[in-house]
Image: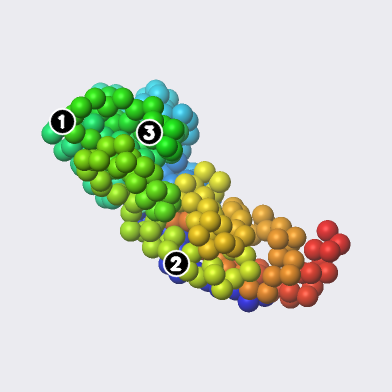
C-alpha cells in the first residue's frame, strides 16, 4: 500500500517540553516524593502509562484541577501543558506542595492576554471545548469575565452588557470552525477585539493534513480519543479535504474494511501522539498488499 506521510505531524514543542520536564523531575532525587501530575500531562494514554511505569509518576485524572488537588497531600505536583488557573496554583502552594509548571508557552500567552483584557474592563468570549482542561485554566484567570462558547447558540445566550468585548480561543481548535464562529460573534458585537490563539503547531498540522489528504483515498489520524487536536485533524480532513478519515489509538485499531479499494493512505498524528505509534501504523500499511486487503475485507 502506498503511504503518504503527512508532515508536519506528531509531537509539538509544548508536548515535548512538558514530557521532558516530568522526566527530569523524576530523575532528580531532590524533588519530594510522591510525584503527581495534575491531570494527564498530554491526552495520550501511552504517554501517561509510560511515565507511571518507567518513572513512577502518578497521573491524576478527573473533572477539574481544583478538586483533583484534594487527592494530593505531599510531594511534588506537575501542572500539565494545558495550563491551570491561579486558584489551583494558590491551593497547591497552601498545601505545601512543590509545584512544577509545564504549561505550554502558547497557553501562558493566552492567560496573560486574558489578565490584561480583564484588567482593562473587557468581557472576554472564549471559544473552546467544554470539559477540556485548557478552557478551565484560562477561565480561572478572570472568573466571571471569561465566557466559554462552543457554538452560535452559546453566543446567543450571552448577556455581556454595554462594556468592551474581546474574543479569544483555545489553542487546539479547528481554525476554519473558529473563523466562522468569530464572524458570527462580530455580527453580534461589531466592535469586538479578536485574538485568535490557535497555536502554530495546531495550524500547521491542520493545513498539512488538508492539503496532503487530497492525494489520498483515506486518512488515518493516530491519536487518543480524548486529544482535542487529534479529533480536530479528523474533522478538518473530512470537512475540508472531503476524504474519509478515522482516529486510531494505535496500529491495533485499524479496521481493514476501511482500506477496501484504497491504494493510497495518508497518515498523520496529533501533537500528543508518541512517534513510535505512528511509525508502527506506517510500517503496517506499507507492508500491506492492496489486492490482499480487498480479499480480506470482502470476507470480513
Ligand atoms: S498543541 Fe500548541 S498549545 Fe498545545 S502544547 Fe502543543 S504547541 Fe502548546
> How far, Cα to Cα, is label 1 from label 3?
19 Å
Q: What is the number of the mark on residue 208? A: 2
Report which residue position mark 3 lands on. Answer: 155
Q: Which callout, 1 or 2, points to the residue nearer the camera?
A: 1
- Residue at image x 46%, y 64%? 9
Secondary structure of the residue carrying tag 1 is loop
Considering only order in the chain, which callout, 3 or 1, is on the residue closer to the N terminus? 1
Mark before the other along the chain sequence, 1 or 2? 1
Count of all numbered marks drawn on residues in the image = 3
Q: Sequence-wise, which precedes: disc 3 or disc 2?
A: 3
Whether residue 21 is situated above or below residue 145 in the rendered picture: below
The residue singled out by tag 1 in the image is 121
Q: Is mark 3 within 8 Å of ligand 1?
A: no
Label 1 crowd (10 A; few <14 / some 14-19 / many >=20): few
Q: Is residue 220 visible?
A: no
Q: Quadrant of the C terminus?
A: bottom right
> Left or right: 33 with respect to 295?
left
Q: What is the C-alpha distance between the residues marked 1 and 2?
A: 39 Å
User: What SS does tag 3 mark?
Assistant: helix
Quick check: can you spot residue 216?
A: yes
Residue at screen point 39% across, 56% down: 202
Viewed as shown, does residue 83 lie left or right of 48? Answer: left
Amino acid at each position: 500500500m502506498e503511504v503518504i506521510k503527512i508532515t508536519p505531524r506528531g509531537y509539538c514543542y509544548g508536548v515535548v517540553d512538558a514530557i521532558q520536564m516530568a522526566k527530569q523531575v523524576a530523575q532528580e532525587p531532590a524533588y519530594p516524593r510522591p510525584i503527581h501530575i495534575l491531570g494527564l500531562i498530554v491526552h495520550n494514554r501511552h504517554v501517561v502509562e509510560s511515565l507511571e511505569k518507567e518513572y513512577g509518576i502518578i497521573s491524576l485524572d478527573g473533572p477539574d484541577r481544583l478538586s483533583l488537588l484534594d487527592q494530593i497531600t505531599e510531594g511534588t505536583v506537575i501542572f500539565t501543558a494545558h495550563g491551570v488557573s491561579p486558584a489551583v496554583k494558590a491551593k497547591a502552594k497552601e498545601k505545601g506542595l512543590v509545584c512544577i509548571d509545564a504549561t505550554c508557552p502558547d497557553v501562558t500567552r493566552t492567560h496573560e492576554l486574558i489578565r490584561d483584557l480583564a484588567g482593562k474592563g473587557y468581557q472576554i468570549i472564549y471559544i473552546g471545548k467544554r470539559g477540556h482542561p485548557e478552557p478551565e485554566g484560562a477561565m480561572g484567570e478572570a472568573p466571571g469575565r471569561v465566557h466559554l462558547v462552543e457554538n452560535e447558540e452559546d453566543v446567543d445566550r450571552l448577556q455581556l452588557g454595554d462594556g468592551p468585548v474581546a474574543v479569544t480561543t483555545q489553542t487546539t481548535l479547528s481554525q476554519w470552525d473558529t473563523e466562522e464562529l468569530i464572524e458570527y460573534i462580530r455580527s453580534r458585537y461589531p466592535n469586538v477585539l479578536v485574538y485568535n490563539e490557535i497555536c502554530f503547531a495546531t495550524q500547521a498540522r491542520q493545513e498539512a493534513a488538508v492539503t496532503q489528504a487530497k492525494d489520498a483515498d483515506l486518512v488515518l489520524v493516530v491519536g487518543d480519543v480524548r486529544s482535542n487536536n487529534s479529533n480536530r485533524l479528523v474533522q478538518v480532513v473530512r470537512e475540508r479535504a472531503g476524504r474519509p478519515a478515522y482516529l486510531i489509538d494505535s496500529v491495533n485499531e485499524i479496521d481493514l474494511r476501511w482500506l477496501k479499494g484504497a491504494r493510497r493512505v495518508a497518515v498523520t498524528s496529533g501533537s500528543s501522539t508518541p512517534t513510535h505509534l505512528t511509525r508502527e501504523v506506517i510500517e503496517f500499511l506499507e507492508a500491506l498488499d492492496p489486492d490482499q486487503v480487498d480479499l480480506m475485507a470482502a470476507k470480513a
